[in-house]
């Protein structure tokens, strides 16, 4: 038999109450469990004396602003109306719980603060996404600010802007511009294609094609597929929309007739991904 206290305070279903009268962590949110094992026949007694069933025990995961927190040995009690964090069970795990200045602080076994809950009414509760964290103010130097304002331009170009007074209000840059990953990635170029790849030398000598779909969102006319045809020589692209994939063959003959009449050339090779 486990024991849990009962609170009259109204809280969100995702609030967690820190309870020194509760013998075990408890929750009624089955979706929070990473692992859950069915429990033997057991019950928990709540504050009004009633006993409610325990349906399982496992490990839950709570996502917070400071990262993901894992809590083990949590009871799954569907009929309880609060999420309870047991002070006694935390201390058994080697953690330290301190109540002071209308806040509850929980420290791990190496003295690192992992949670702070403010006093709400006469109890201590926290909502994972509303945790308070210490924020350290940072100040970017002028060259970083203007580097971003001007579209991540090169430092020498920024110095030239100031020198020739191209933009009004630009300050004198005394700091060196740090390396940004985005800038480095933007300078990278694609490796060249192997020269052995055959390319066409005239229109319709090689046509690339691909079928796209089914799309998750229908068009206004109920279209879920489309087929592309790209001429390798001119890079001209044609798109035909289809309601069903079975229309592919008909669309190809329609395309073939159209482009051959317009160009006075004949399609010689079709390149596709072997889609059926």
Image (cartoon, rainbow, N blue to C red):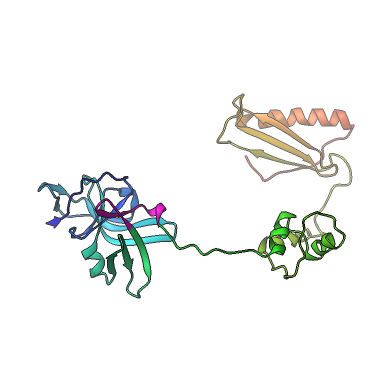
Region in magenta: 118-131
Q: Is residue 166 left or right of residue 72?
A: right
Where is 233 relative to 160, above or below? above
Quadrant (top left/top right/bottom left/bottom right) for the N terminus: bottom left
Nearer to us in this view, 102 or 39: 102
Where is 211 relative to 28, above or below? above
The residue lying at 82 percent from left, 61 percent from top is: 162
| One can see residue 66 in this view | yes
Quadrant (top left/top right/bottom left/bottom right) for the C terminus: top right
Residue 271 position by quadrant: top right
Q: Is residue 49 left or right of residue 33?
A: left
Residue 157 position by quadrant: bottom right
Q: Is residue 185 left or right of residue 40?
A: right
Outermost residue to the top: 221
Q: Is residue 28 left or right of residue 274?
A: left
The residue lying at 33 percent from left, 57 percent from top is: 118
Image spot of residue 154 (x, y percent): 78, 62
Image spot of residue 24 (x, y percent): 21, 59
């Amino acid at each position: 038999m486990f024991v849990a206290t009962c609170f009259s305070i109204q809280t969100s279903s995702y609030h967690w109450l820190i309870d020194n009268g509760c013998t075990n962590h408890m929750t009624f949110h089955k979706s929070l469990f990473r692992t859950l094992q069915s429990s033997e026949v057991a019950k928990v007694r709540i504050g009004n004396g009633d006993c409610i069933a325990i349906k399982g025990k496992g490990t839950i995961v709570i996502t917070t602003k400071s990262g993901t927190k894992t809590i083990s040995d949590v009871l799954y009690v569907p009929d309880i109306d609060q999420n309870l964090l047991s002070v006694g069970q935390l201390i058994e795990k080697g953690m330290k719980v301190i109540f002071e200045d209308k806040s509850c602080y929980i420290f791990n076994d190496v003295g690192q603060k992992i949670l702070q809950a403010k006093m709400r009414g006469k109890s201590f509760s926290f909502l994972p996404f509303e945790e308070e964290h210490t924020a350290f103010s940072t100040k970017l130097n002028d060259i970083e600010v203007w580097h971003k304002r001007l579209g991540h331009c090169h430092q020498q170009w920024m110095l030239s802007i100031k020198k020739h007074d191209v933009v009004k209000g630009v300050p004198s840059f005394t700091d060196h511009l740090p390396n940004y990953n985005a800038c480095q990635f933007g300078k990278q170029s694609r490796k060249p294609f192997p020269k052995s790849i055959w390319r066409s030398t005239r229109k319709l000598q090689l046509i690339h094609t691909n079928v796209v779909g089914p799309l998750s969102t229908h068009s206004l006319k109920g279209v879920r597929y489309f087929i592309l045809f790209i001429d390798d020589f001119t890079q001209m692209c044609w798109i035909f929309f289809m309601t069903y994939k079975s229309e592919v063959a008909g669309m190809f003959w329609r395309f073939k007739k159209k482009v051959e009449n317009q160009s006075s050339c004949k399609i010689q090779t079709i390149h596709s991904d072997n889609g059926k």
